[in-house]
Image (cartoon, rainbow, N blue to C red):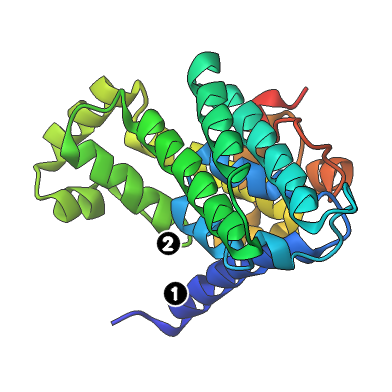
């Protein structure tokens, strides 16, 4: 049974994840979050963001007097940007653009709005699944892949080696060695990196304070969170938020590894 405190942390974390979806309607660079999800292989999030059909989206610039051609142009823009972000994420240039070319040719045959929207959904999910698989390609074993999925879905909790070992049914010592051999990182370092990466996104895309984020992501205390965050990014969470809050241009990576 989860404690009241853990339930509250999970609720706050889920609230942030759900609030991200609203950015698609916001007036500031909503594309950044969308294409970043494609690059990161976040399939479930992309499906959520694509719930609203392309042809129903508000604020699309008028690119043609012909309605269908207008949406085809916007489709082509999405295809080009998705390819660019996937290349940034490690997909080969030839593969990314061959996928883009394929879908752009397909949309040219669409005769009604719904067909364009349906194809847009398929393309975005296709790109995202390929990126998810690409990120796991170097991981040979199912246990490590399952650990990574568990970690990414449970960043609002305290994740321990014993918890992961129990989740995949392996001896903790063996799992620790296996994870390090396949990812090049210890489990604790990987968890720390993912929590800081998520904290960076929350500082940019939400209005949560550093103190709230430290609690939501289950850091022991604010001081520890600040020290870990500064070690990874070179600045405190507060300074990072002041520098990047809702101002990151499209195409610029937001990973802490790219922070000067």
The residue to which callout 1 is attached is: 6
Q: Nearer the viewer, residue 40 or 242?
A: 40
- Horizontally, residue 53 falls left or right of residue 59, namely left
State the SS at label 2. loop
- Horizontally, residue 57 falls left or right of residue 141, namely right
Residue at the (68%, 49%) spot, across then down: 33
Q: Quadrant of residue 250?
A: top right
Q: Quadrant of residue 15?
A: bottom right
Q: Which circle's residue, 2 or 1, is located before the other in the chain? A: 1
| Image quarter (top left, top right, bottom left or bottom right) of the C terminus | top right
* 234 in relation to 66, above or below: above
Image marks 2 and 1: residues in contact by CB distance under 8 Å: yes
* 95 in relation to 161, above or below: above
Q: Nearer the viewer, residue 123 or 213?
A: 123
Instruction: For label 2, count other residues whose C-alpha is less than 10 Å away and answer few (under 14), some (14-19) or many (20+).
Output: some
Residue at the (21%, 51%) spot, across then down: 162
Q: Is residue 221 visible?
A: no
| Image quarter (top left, top right, bottom left or bottom right) of the N terminus | bottom left
Q: Nearer the viewer, residue 10 or 56?
A: 56
Q: Nearer the viewer, residue 200 or 224?
A: 200
Q: Which mark is residue 243?
A: none
State the SS at label 1. helix
x and y percent of residue 93 in the render? 55, 16
The residue to which callout 2 is attached is: 157
Instruction: For label 1, count other residues whose C-alpha is less than 10 Å away and answer few (under 14), some (14-19) or many (20+).
Output: some
Residue at the (71%, 63%) spot, across then down: 55
> How far, Cα to Cα, is label 2 from label 1?
7 Å
x and y percent of residue 71 in the render? 74, 52
Residue at the (12%, 33%) spot, across then down: 174
């Amino acid at each position: 049974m989860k404690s009241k405190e853990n339930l509250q942390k999970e609720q706050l974390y889920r609230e942030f994840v759900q609030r991200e979806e609203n950015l698609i309607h916001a007036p500031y660079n909503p594309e950044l979050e969308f294409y970043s999800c494609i690059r990161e292989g976040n399939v479930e999030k992309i499906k959520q963001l694509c719930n609203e059909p392309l042809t129903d989206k508000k604020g699309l610039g008028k690119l043609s007097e012909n309605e269908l051609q207008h949406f085809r142009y916007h489709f082509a823009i999405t295809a080009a940007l998705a390819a660019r972000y996937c290349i940034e994420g490690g997909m080969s240039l030839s593969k990314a653009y061959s996928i883009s070319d394929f879908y752009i040719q397909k949309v040219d045959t669409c005769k009604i709005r719904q067909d364009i929207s349906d194809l847009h959904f398929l393309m975005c999910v296709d790109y995202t699944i390929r990126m998810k698989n690409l990120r796991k390609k170097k991981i040979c074993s199912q246990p490590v892949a399952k650990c990574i999925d568990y970690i990414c879905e449970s960043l609002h909790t305290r994740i321990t080696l014993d918890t992961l070992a129990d989740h995949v049914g392996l001896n903790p010592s063996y799992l620790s060695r296996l994870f390090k051999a396949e990812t090049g990182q210890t489990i604790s370092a990987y968890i720390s990196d993912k929590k800081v990466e998520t904290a960076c996104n929350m500082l940019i895309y939400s209005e949560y304070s550093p103190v709230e984020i430290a609690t939501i992501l289950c850091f022991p205390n604010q001081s520890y969170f600040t020290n870990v965050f500064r070690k990874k990014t070179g600045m405190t969470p507060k300074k990072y938020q002041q520098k990047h809050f809702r101002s990151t241009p499209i195409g610029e990576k937001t990973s802490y590894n790219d922070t000067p």
